[in-house]
Structures are given as C-alpha cells and as structure tokens.
Amino acid sequence: MTDPTTAPATGAAVRTTYWTRLDSPLGPLLLTADSSGALTSLSLPGQKGGREVRADWRHDAGPFRAAEEQLEAYFAGELKEFRLPLRTDGTAFRERVWSALDDVPYGTTTTYGEIAARVGAPRAALRAVGGAIGANPLLILRPCHRVIGTNGSLTGYAAGLEKKVRLLTLEGAL
C-alpha cells in the first residue's frame, strides 16, 4: 500500500481506496480500505446503499488478509469478536450509534430503543437511530444484524431479512 500523495495540479490530497471481494456463505463480500489499511466498508450482495467498485479504486487483496481470516473464522463459528481496524466517515451522531453496535455481544440481540439509550438519544430519536443503523457501512463487522424490534420482530436489514436471519442463526440468537 502507498500513503496518500499530493496531486501536483491542485495540491489536494489524493486518497487511495483499496478493494477486494471475498467469498462467503452470504455471497461475495465487497470490502474497501483506506491507505492505512483500516476497513471502510463491507457490502453484501443486494445490499440497499451498498458500495460499488469505482474506476479510481485500486484492487489489492493485501490490506484484507486479516479481515479474510477473521471472516472465515466467523462464518465457521470459531470467531465471536472481530479485531480489525475500522474507519467510518459519518456524522457525530451516526458514529456514536455505530460505536454502540460494537458493544452488542455475539449471540445476543438488542433493540433500537436500547441503542438510542446507549447513545443518549431521546425516544423521539428512534427514527434517526434506525436511519444510522441502516446506513452502517460495515455490515457484519459492526453487527447491525443484532438489532431487532422491541416486540422481537426481525426488522429491516440493508442486505435483506434472509441474510439477517442467517447471521443471527449462525450466532445462535435465533
């Protein structure tokens, strides 16, 4: 990997986005990382709002070796907590919500209301919490699939409810 460089014509920093695809039981995963190797997204096939490869991205599997190993172990039922560098670029509110997802243990579920309480948001902000969860750019790694409705219903998942069910079943939460 190379560090960001300065574009000669404008003097603006050029950031390199690296990408790769990994096979998984849910289909091919699209992963992106920044020049430091921190993961910036994990998209599933058919994901609403998922990323698509851009022409200015650099295909390189190198930055994703640890992610590949950990995802394989996760899908084999051998890994319960990811230890990978992550970097997201959301509003302060979204970052708090996404960080709260990191605290939801493997094999458990939580509700939108519980996430709202963790980030200090009032009940009236449940829609905003749901919107932040739905915009999570790091599916699986930041476990938004563990968030369910207050009544126990399996509410939306950007990659589809079938994939949410498969992840929760893998983790023994269903």
Image (tube, rainbow, N blue to C red):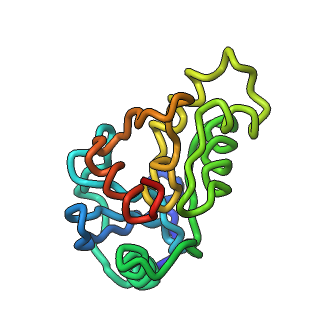
In the image, 45: left or right of 62? left
| Residue 88 appears in view | yes
In the image, 62: left or right of 115? left
In the image, 108: left or right of 41? right
Which residue shows up at 70% across the image and 19% down it? Answer: 123
Residue 38, x across and y down, in percent: 53, 69
Instruction: Give whichever of 173, 17 is nearer the camera.
Output: 173
Which residue shows up at 57% across the image and 55% down it? Answer: 108
Which residue shows up at 29% across the image and 54% down it? Answer: 44
Residue 149, x across and y down, in percent: 51, 31
State how many labels appear: 0
Which residue shows up at 64% across the image and 44% down it? Answer: 95
Instruction: Give whichever of 168, 84 is nearer the camera.
Output: 168
Q: Quadrant where the N terminus lies?
A: bottom left
Height in image: 34 above or below 97?
below
**Quarter of the image where one finds residue 166:** bottom left
| Residue 1 appears in view | no
Height in image: 18 above or below 137?
below
Instruction: Give whichever of 159, 51 is nearer the camera.
Output: 159
Which residue extends farthest top?
124
Which residue extends farthest right?
120
Height in image: 98 above or below 62?
above
Residue 54, x across and y down, in percent: 25, 54
Residue 107, x across and y down, in percent: 53, 61
